[in-house]
Amino acid sequence: MRAVRLHAARDLRFETVEAPLPPGPGEVTLAVTAAGICGSDLHNYATGAWISRAPSVAGHEFTGIVTALGAGVEHVSPGQRVIVDSRHVCGECPACREGDAQVCENLGFLGEIIDGGFAEAVTLPGRNVVAAPEGVADRHLAMVEPLAVALHALRRLDAPEGAEIVIAGCGPIGGFTALLATRMGHPVRVIERNDARAALVAEVTGAVRTDLETLPRFRHAIDTTGHAAVIGGLLERIAGCSRLALVGIGAPREVLDPVQLVEREITLLGCHAYAGEFLEIGPMLPGLAEALDAFTAACIRLEEVPAAYEALLSGSATGLKTIILCDGDRA
């Protein structure tokens, strides 16, 4: 089958490989229809930060059709379209038992710890798939995972009804967060150095673009950039008794003075993946369809993925989300 595999940092290859093994107990096999390229895919490619096995079929944002079931899988059926939970969890640690699988002690992700969805087919744990809502295009089903990340960040921020939210970064997560926030009735200001992305997010969501240096007083913010300078700038300008949620992943480094948090009563929140929000996104998709299409930069084939990675890393790609049509003809 055709697939895109990560062999090492900066070594991503389109290849013909063996089809996945048939599903074992508790597993399912999918014919993958569509997948999305995530910022964390690019980070892993550029840095090798999360390479735990190689080569590995990349991709954790995808959707597909069930083609085979292993023993014990009864919640989906062959021929059924499904959405895919990207988290590979143990189900046994205290965090998993308490319903906090996003901080599982043995957490991994599809496309890293096991083969992912940048291929024509994949075998994965049955607990990672859920029946897809009817009538939703595959290209939109492939965006459930990043939308769940955005919704989780908003839930963690817990801004009061109608409160303004500042969002740093207009990449996919920043754009999706702005989209969901404005649909919830929050006024949104976005900070983004890329003019085209900032304009697109503002046009689609109604958010207002602002600069960090001239940002008016604010009390609720989400950083999707992971950049120390941006996080530091937000902390310098945020009002006392306020909340800042961090969802972007950057390089580990010192970015704050804890005394600042104490004396100004600033609540700093980490946001990792998602919890129950994954199951909430499906019903929202029909109402988001027009915006999701506006955010889509391109729909490409599997053989075009390595070049797309380079374009995205160079900043030359337009739009927010690149979608891969893994079976060649569905959109």
Image (tube, rainbow, N blue to C red):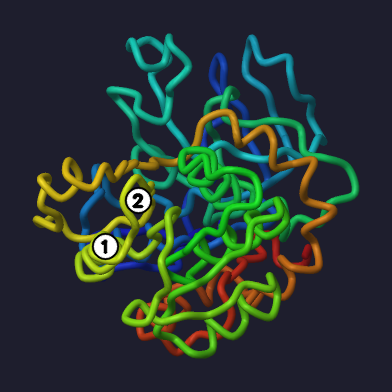
Quadrant in which residue 219 is drawn: bottom left
Given contact means CB atoms under 8 Å apart, are the residues at marks 1 and 2 in contact?
A: yes
Q: Position of residue 102 (x, y in %)?
A: 41, 30
The amino acid beneath tag 2 is: Leu
Q: Residue at (58%, 77%) from the top-left corner?
A: 208
**313 shown above or below 157:** below
Q: Which mark is residue 231?
A: 1
> If you read the primary sequence from the N terminus, does the residue marked by circle 1 or circle 2 appear first?
1
Q: Residue at (60%, 24%) from the top-left corner?
A: 126
How packed is label 1: few (under 14 Cα within 10 Å), some, or many (20 or more)?
many
Quadrant in which residue 295 is drawn: bottom right
Q: Specify the quadrant that holds the C terminus.
A: bottom right
103 with respect to 84 (left or right): left
Real-space Cα separation, disc 1 to disc 2, in angstroms? 8 Å
Q: Specify the quadrant that holds the N terminus.
A: bottom right
254 with respect to 245 (left or right): left
Q: Position of residue 275 (x, y in %)?
A: 51, 30
Q: 172 or 128: which is nearer to us?
A: 172
How packed is label 2: few (under 14 Cα within 10 Å), some, or many (20 or more)?
many
Q: Position of residue 189 (x, y in %)?
A: 53, 70
